[in-house]
Image (tube, helix red, strand yellow):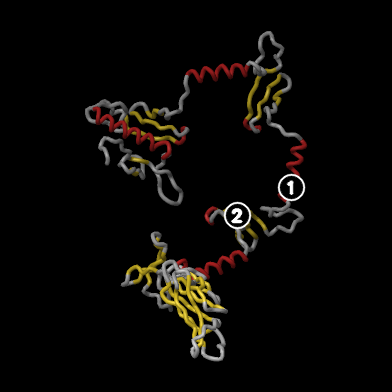
Amino acid sequence: MGNSNWPTFPGLPNMTQDGDGRPQVLDLIPGKQRGTPLNAFLFNPLIRSICDLRDGQDRLGQSSFVPSQPREGHNDSVVNNLGYQNENGGIPYLSVVGKGLIFLQPAGDFALNSDLTAERERAQAVEATMVPSQPREGHNDSVVNNLGYQNENGGIPYLSVAGKGLIFLQPAGDFALNSDLTAERERAQAVEATMVPSQPREGHNDSVVNNLGYQNENGGIPYLSVVGKGLIFLQPAGDFALNSDLTAERERAQAVEATMVPSQPREGHNDGAVNNFGFDQADGRPWVSLVGRGIVKLLGLSEFAWWLDQNGYVRLPGGLLIQWGYRASSNGTFKFPTPFKEKCFVLIASNADAQGQFVDAAYGWPVDAENFFIGTKSSSTGEKNGFAVSWIAFGK
């Protein structure tokens, strides 16, 4: 919500407002938007502080700051603008009638007198150990008549000595051993030997290269400008993958995609009713959203289990367990290879191979969830003879 007493800036283009309605400036962003010609990082906190002060004044019924516009019935008409001058070191200012620009002190841009005194004492102690720039009475330093710093000569201090002119001094620590310089030259030359030159080199076959650069607009990629070919973009170091890895990843992804339900109808496929698919975190099952039918839950692979062998089983969703097996000899109680969790519903037995002289009937029944009986006997005599038997059982 805004406050009619907050300052306004009619002379500044592209002013905006923050979430509370306070005026704010935007930094200039080349190529994207027109900003306000003020630094947002420095200026917006100042604006917010002024708005907060004005809110406090409204609550207390008193004024403690200089308004940016004259207020009716107040003696502040001399203030006609508030701004920020980049050319003067980035300092905020007031424009006052009859006085011109009055530059303000940025918050935090000050020093304590105690710090200033300590720095003066430190500097004086250092200066006491230095060569004087002017002759000192009673000292043999009359040949030195000046001490200075020449920016045009790489920023090196110098002495002006009578009869000798300027003598440039070596700054403390600003030197290198010849051995270090030689080692660095050899290292740099070894690196340069592996690089593509940005300009043709005499006696080398690299005349087709006439420039080397970096194009920010193309994702920040270095390039060579080659005569007759234009720009050739280079691959940044480390930003690459092997073709074999790319092929393996493509094959893996295609195998996964082949098992998925599409989220949008595919041309030439009968899946037009599918408009979305997802995964239910609560029960861990995938689902598809079908037009006209809503959410349809799918069975996950984790709901199936199987072992396909002569003695094997299949566990289906809902808990149904089907298992089967072979007994080389029968007429006894045996354990199920995979015990049922609750009970065996039914067990069916059959002869597994050739019979005896007469028909030998196979039979059996479940004893409990873990055991079953199975056997064979002669259909003519009733004799139990224990031939090989195959069986299948259903339960949960």
Q: Tell me the quarter of the image containing the C terminus.
A: bottom left
Mark 2 burial class by Cα count in 10 Å: few <14, some 14-19, many 20+: some
Q: Tell me the quarter of the image containing the N terminus.
A: top left
Q: Position of residue 390 (x, y in %)?
A: 52, 80
Relative side of 211 to 101, left or right: right
Q: Quadrant of residue 142?
A: top right
Q: Quadrant of residue 145?
A: top right
Secondary structure of residue under mark 1: helix
Q: Position of residue 343 (x, y in %)?
A: 42, 70
Q: Height in image: 392 above or below 381? A: above
Q: Identify the residue at horizontal 52%, vertical 17% (top origin).
A: 117
Label 1 sits on residue: 189
Q: Height in image: 165 above or below 337? A: above
Name the amino acid, label 2: Pro
Q: Position of residue 7 (x, y in %)?
A: 30, 36
Label 2 sits on residue: 222
Q: Nearer the viewer, residue 169 or 53?
A: 53
